[in-house]
Amino acid sequence: PRSQKLASNSYLAPYLPVKDRSQIGKENATMVMLVRNSDLDAALESIRSLEDRFNRHFRYPWVFLNDVPFTREFMEQTSLMASGQTYYETIPTEDWNRPAFINEEKYRRNLREFEEKKIIYGASESYRNMCHFNSGYFYRQKRLLNYEWYFRVEPEVRYMCDFQYDPFTVLRENNKIYGFVITIQDYDSTIPSLWPTVEKFMETYPELVHPNNSLKFITTNETSLTNGFEMAESSSEYNLCHFWSNFEIGNLNFFRSEAYSKYFNFLDKTGGFYYERWGDAPVHSIALNILADKNSIHHFEDIGYYHPPYLTCPTSIDIVASKRCVCKAYGVFNEVIDEPVDLLPQSCLTRWWRYGAGKTF
Ligand code: GDP
Ligand code: MN
């Protein structure tokens, strides 16, 4: 079992190969995983999958972030699973906990209200800290300042196809700053005041709105093009579409820019991360849709990926075969998890095709 430590006096020790961890990949890039010690098994699954499908050919490092110190067991097991260097960082408490300006009474009242409404993660305080951290703090953690590119990985995910190229290089060479695989609609009830806040932000800083933005992608509200089902209803102009942020390959300098920092601070000071339950996915996405050139955002259509409960699989059978994918884009699905989200009404992919970046390479 995983919990058995690989003791240095193990009888296998003399037969274990010494790992060559020297980096082969040419980019200034790292994997990054925010994770709890209790997620060890699920983290190992994700690392194994990404190493087998991609990173063992490149040996990019892994940065593990946690709000409490990592256990020795976590560090041992994950560093054995990874091909590259591994770093373990404890997040400073002031980057993790809710800011002092959050009104305690209002916060508690809203937590109860979210719980009563049975909103997903509605009553979770740690989930709010996590979303707040991923929205405004991960990219300024000291260890990550060494890197320009990051690949966000979560526990319990799977990569269904061989990569066969370096996605960091693909983004850099094609002037992209962000790549996604799944785009879906968010829960309206978690973000009631997010869009009104974003609109105020755009009024306050019109010069930060990129002339070639992808605002249309997140404000069109037509029926899904795939199957004729109605999409989820939003109480505002925002159609709830966002890039699912448990998979992200991106340029850290976008988040470290003055524009993003103004955007994050503008959102943060309303308290919406805590009084409501704003997710880092819509927060990242909306920033990209407003502040970035739409042609700098890339849909990796050839990377199969599964994060419960959604799967995406390349549509082309030639790609599925040649990239050794263990998923299928269409056909007869035996279980719900076999069926790619791209075929479901909550997917925003067809909108991205219509209103997002064209084929730019
Ligand atoms: P979901 O994908 O939205 O259902 O949320 P997850 O439970 O997967 O959390 C998102 C990411 O944040 C995962 O990488 C988790 O391991 C991590 N995470 C969530 N809560 C905490 C926490 O309290 N502490 C730490 N260290 N990581 C957390
Ligand atoms: Mn997750």
Image: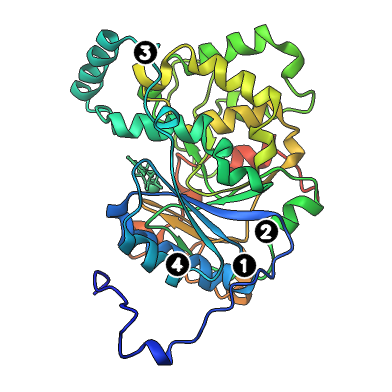
Please tell me whether mark 2 or mark 4 is closer to you in this view: 4
N-terminal of the two: label 2 or label 4?
A: 4
Kindly state the secondary structure of the residue where label 2 is placed: helix
Q: Residue at x 42, y 17 (%)?
A: 272
Viewer-nearest of discs 3 and 1: 3
Whichever of labels 3 and 1 marks the residue nearer the N terminus, that label is 3
Identify the residue at horizontal 76%, vertical 33% (top origin): 293
Q: Which mark is residue 102?
A: 3
Question: Are there few (<14), some (14-19), or many (20+) residues within 10 Å of tag 4?
Answer: some
Q: Amino acid at mark 4?
A: Ser
The label on residue 67 is none
Question: Residue 344, position in %: x, y?
Answer: 45, 46
Q: Secondary structure at mark 4?
A: helix
Q: Which of the two labelled residues, at mark 3 and mark 4, occupies the earlier sequence position?
A: 4
Q: Marks 2 and 1, Cα distance to the nearest angstrom?
A: 8 Å
Q: What residue would you read off at disc 1?
A: 163
Q: Mark 3 vs mark 2: which is more N-terminal?
A: 3
In the picture, measured across the screen, residue 356 lies left or right of residue 120, that is right
Residue 8 visible within the image: yes
Q: Residues within 10 Å of mark 3 (few under 14, many from 20)?
A: some
The coloring applied to the image is rainbow
Residue in front for this viewpoint, 277 or 262: 262
According to the picture, the residue beneath numbered tag 4 turns out to be 79
Residue type, numbered disc 3: Ile
Residue beneath label 2, please? 167
Closer to the eye: label 3 or 2: 3
Q: Tag 1: Cα neighbours inside 10 Å, few (<14), some, or many (≥20)?
A: many
**Marks 2 and 1 in Cβ contact (< 8 Å):** yes
Question: What's the distance in space between the residues labelled 3 and 1, CA to CA?
Answer: 43 Å
